[in-house]
Image (cartoon, rainbow, N blue to C red):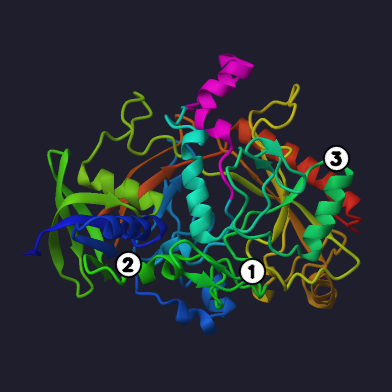
Amino acid sequence: MKTLPAVDAVIIGGGWAGLLMAKELGSRTALSIVVLERGVPRNPADYADAMDELDYAIRMRMMQDLSQETVTLRHNASERALPLRQHGSFQPGAGVGGSGEHWNALCPRFLPDCFELLSKTTEKYGAKALPEDHSIRDWGVTYDELEPYYTRVDKLLGVSGKAGNLKGKQIEGGNIFEGPRSEEYPTPPTKVPYFAALFRDAAKSLGYHPFPAPSATLSQSYTNPDGISRGGCTYCGFCGRFGCMVGAKAQPTTLLLPIIQKRKNVVLRTGAWVRRILSDFGSKSRGVTYIDASGEEVFQPASLVFLSSWTFNNTRLLLLSGIGEPYSPATGRGTVGSNLTHQVSTNAATAFFEQPLNRFMGSGSAAMFIGDLDGDAFDRGNLPFLRGGTLGARGYGFQPIANFGVVPHSVKAKWGSEWKKAAVDYYDRTGVIGFTGEHLAYKSNFMDLDPTYKDKLGDPLLRLTLDWHENERKMSEFATAKAVEIARVMNAKEI
């Protein structure tokens, strides 16, 4: 194994977290820094002609190659996990910028009580209200402590939106249920697509408080504190799973890479597949080993090692490297791999309309939401679940391959001329009210190394043991009923 000259710091992963760490360390210190990214180099200029739905949205060009490494999944510890061979809920990016290149740019903040979930829930409802298998904890930091950093990120990204709680004062038109903001958003909200406007008006008539989604896609030209300027969105509809062709969407290659490239003390290496973090008995790091772009295994000595890749990859690397105590659901001991959560994300109601909705226009985060059902914002009375989420209508741009063929139940044919006619007729007359809720932490949801399946290098894959519990199922049922109610007021022809 070849040993490279020692550096002060190695950063594993070249996405938002990794490049932001490289920018801050490289700008504030004289430390020698190496960023290791196993994917390909990326340049925002490459996206100018990259609106190929088949390549990017269907074949997932910007995602991790699952034939080389994936995760295995089971719903409980009695099942045998099987490898995921296509992208679904989890879409880790590959290449410089990571998932920050292909994200939809929705940019909300956590609610204040999310950071103190155990203590706040127990205080309000009592310990007996918590699910029996829960592993909910307080974070150890509060919203107020993090708020200045939220604001700093808003300015870095140029987040577009409307404050609903400014220094404790509720403001109509924004999310009045959010935590207090110290400042207004850097840029105004993005334009409201027609379907989202229908949702807004219907929700408001029912007594809800709709607000425009906070978006890291610019509504207008903006120059951030680092002096990087971007233009506003053109609403082409090619956002999620794509890089932005005009640079309006905040991406690591747009906001961070140009600064890093000017730093002589920062080196970015692509095609670098990190296999292990070497340490002294799992305590002090000595560096990392990785397979370079030529296929050679090398050792990069470093005093500091930062894990900045996708959560699954960070956890897997810790487990493979023997760092930290792996979580055991049987004993409750260990932390590495514990408290796996995702989100309660559903298409709560699919609505069909008489009129066209112009859904080919939009952006990944041009949407209207309601926060009335989020967290503990509402009186849950005797509802059989804790917490909640947001309902919303998004105008993210209907692309023809992914969205063609959705027809109402009244169309009985599954193929043939009747079905084809209905599919064409309803292509631009279909809208989805989506729900995104909280997934509580449970002792039975965790990550460990799979005993059977391995990656292309022979290392064990990460195994996910993950499922919704009764709390999440009841929450989803509740949200669906509310979404259907709103869709009816939107004058949907069929739901």
Q: Position of residue 476 (x, y in %)?
A: 69, 40
Residue 472 sits in quarter: top right
Give amino acid for label 1: Gln
Quadrant, the C terminus: bottom right
Crowding at mark 3 (Cα within 10 Å: few <14, some 14-19, many 20+)? few
Crowding at mark 2 (Cα within 10 Å: few <14, some 14-19, many 20+)? many
Give amino acid for label 2: Ile
Q: Which residues are magenta?
A: 108-136
Label 1: element kind:
loop
Q: Residue at x 52, y 35 (%)?
A: 143
Whole-angstrom CA distance, mark 2 to mark 1, is: 25 Å
Q: Please give left or right for residue 231 compared with residue 417 in the image.
A: left
Seen from the viewer's position, the closer of residues 32 and 311 is: 32
Q: Please give left or right for residue 427 compared with residue 112 in the image.
A: right
Q: Residue at x 59, y 64 (%)?
A: 217
- Observer able to see residue 131: no
Seen from the viewer's position, the closer of residues 373 and 29 is: 29
Q: Position of residue 256 (x, y in %)?
A: 40, 65
Q: How many marks?
A: 3
- In the picture of the structure, the residue carrying the numbered disc 2 is 260
- In the picture of the structure, the residue carrying the numbered disc 3 is 207
Residue 229: in magenta span: no
Give amino acid for label 3: Gly
